[in-house]
Each structure stands twice: as C-alpha cells, then as structure tokens.
Image: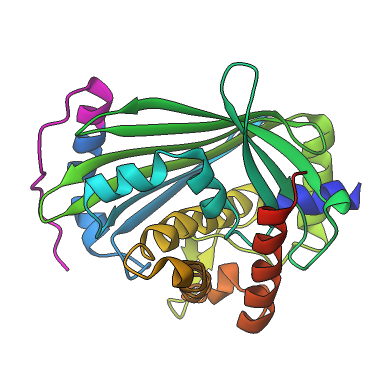
Amino acid sequence: MWKCLAVWIALSSLGLAFAAAPESSTGALLLAKYASLADRLRQNQYQRPLYLDSSESDNDIQGDIYAVVDYPFATVSAGLNDPDNWCEVLSLHLNTKYCRAAPGQSQTVLRVSIGKKYSQPLEDAYRLEFSYRVAKASANYLEIQLSADKGPLDTRNYRIQLRAIPLANDRTFLHMTYFYAYGWAGRTAMKTYLATLGRSKVGFTIASRQSNGQPEYIRGMRGLVERNAMRYYLAIDAYLGAFDAASDLQLGKRLQNWFSATEQYPRQLHEIERGAYIDMKRAEFLRQQTLVY
C-alpha cells in the first residue's frame, strides 16, 4: 500500500495584446481567460506571470495553471506537439522514473513509470500508460491531451491537458490542467498519509493569514494537487527554455532550470538537494534512452 501511495503523491507588464485572433471557440475562451487574469498575472506571489487554481470534490481533484511564457507560439507548438518531447518534459519531474513513447492500438502512448523521490529500480515503480492525443494544432491554437485510465490505489482518469495561444511580442499564454479521480480506497489511503507523513505539506493557495500577516497555505488534497501541477508546469517551462542551448547541453540546462525554479518555492516543493537531483536524473535519462521497458 505505501509503495502505491508514494507513487500517487508523486503523481514585466503583460498588457492585453495578442498575436492573432484564435480561430476556434476554445481558443477564444482561452483568450478571454487571459484578459480576465491580467491583474493576477501581473502581480502575484509567484514572481512570474502565473495563476494557479485548484478544486476538489468527493471523487476527484484538479489543479489548473495559467501562465505567460516568453517563447514564441511557434516554438511552443513545435516543442510540445511531439510525444517523444513530452517524455522529456515529464521526466524532469522528481517522481518520473521512466518515459517512452510507443505506438498503441489507436494512438501513441507514453509508457511512464512513477516512483519515489530517490533512485529506484523500475520494477519498484508504478507503471501508467498515457494516451497521447493532439486535439488541435494550428497557427493560433494548440491543445495536447494525455490521459490514463488507471493508476495506483483505485485512482483513475488521469489527465494532463495543455492549451496554448499566441500573444504579442513573441509570447505565449498556456493553460495546463492536472486531474485525476479516485475511489474509496484511494481517498482513505490519502487521508491517512495527509494525517501522518504528509501533515506538514502545503500547497500554494493562501487559505488565511496569521495575526502577523504571514500566509497559511492550503493543505490536504488540494495542497497535493497544487504541488504536482506546479512541478509539471515548471517542467514544461524548463523544457522550452533550453532550446537555445547546443543539443548536447540541453539536458543539463533543463535539469538545472527545473531545480532552480522549484527552489523558488521551497516551502512547497523542496525535497532533495540539487546534486542528488541532477545525478539521479542523468542516470534515469540514460536508462530511458537505452532500455525499452
């Protein structure tokens, strides 16, 4: 049970100018969301143009991140409209031990192994199979969907979705969703974890403030999904940010950038030291390139 539980846990001024009118209703809705979030993107606790939201019901949990990135839409689209590149993104996450794109029955799948925050054999990790789908890819809108039917401890319907539209000045507006559902067994196991080993863990949403003004961050399931959503978003940003490096230097730059970005939020995201993370990930990327699992 605890093995599966550890796997699950793993799981400047902006203005309102945009590059071109979105050609789909979903693109138009995303543009409207960008306009409505202008003030929050401009001034927030994250020290970057980013807004994070989360929600929880009796049966599922979801984290949403909206952000402006300083990469042209063409760069974002070319980089993320490729299943192999998504394995590069996902593998930056602390708990991703392996990822390989492969043909499935009807579409490409990503065979992903999720484990603990330190090095471990693949047979000790939990294997998920994400279906990879390009819902839309045009000059003004991109939508990528990753979905997995089943996960550990009665979890199901995993979904990572990315939507993007171009903005003016070679920038792009992103919306990333991280979602999964769970049953009685999963909810019970997670409540046990959150009451014991995970009782000190917090998310990013400020639930209240102390008398001295210090924030009290949200805990529980929403705190959990917010941490993982942020880790996945920062992986996307770190992946895109290394394109300007020579090909043999890109992995090192991505690893350094992802770790540095997570360390901006140590209360929520710090787990291991930089050297341990870099060494572990270099070994995992090498295994990923040489082993078909």
**Number of residue marks:** 0
Q: Position of 37 compared to 212: left or right?
A: left
Q: Is residue 86 magenta?
A: no
Q: Position of residue 183 (x, y in %)?
A: 77, 29
Q: Position of 133 compared to 97: left or right?
A: left
Judging depth in this view, the residue of 17 and 133 nearest the camera is 133
Q: Residue at x 61, y 74 (%)?
A: 270
Q: Is residue 19 magenta?
A: yes
The vertical placement of 23 against 17, above or below, is above
Q: Is residue 174 visible?
A: no
Judging depth in this view, the residue of 283 and 201 nearest the camera is 283
Judging depth in this view, the residue of 150 and 127 nearest the camera is 127
Q: Is residue 231 visible?
A: yes
Q: Residue at x 20, y 56 (%)?
A: 39
Q: Residue at x 75, y 35 (%)?
A: 151
* Boundaries of the magenta span: 12-29
Res 287 → quadrant: bottom right
- Quarter holding the C terminus is top right
Q: Residue at x 11, y 32 (%)?
A: 21
Q: Position of residue 34 (x, y in %)?
A: 22, 43
Judging depth in this view, the residue of 144 and 84 nearest the camera is 84
Q: Position of 79 compared to 72: left or right?
A: right
Q: Position of residue 209 (x, y in %)?
A: 47, 68
Q: Main secondary structure of the magenta part?
A: loop
Q: Position of residue 192 (x, y in %)?
A: 84, 51
Determine the residue located farthest toward the right in the rendered image. 1
Res 165 → quadrant: top left
The vertical placement of 145 against 212, above or below, is above
Res 26 → quadrant: top left
Q: Give the colour scheme of this rendering.
A: rainbow
Q: Position of 162 compared to 126: left or right?
A: left
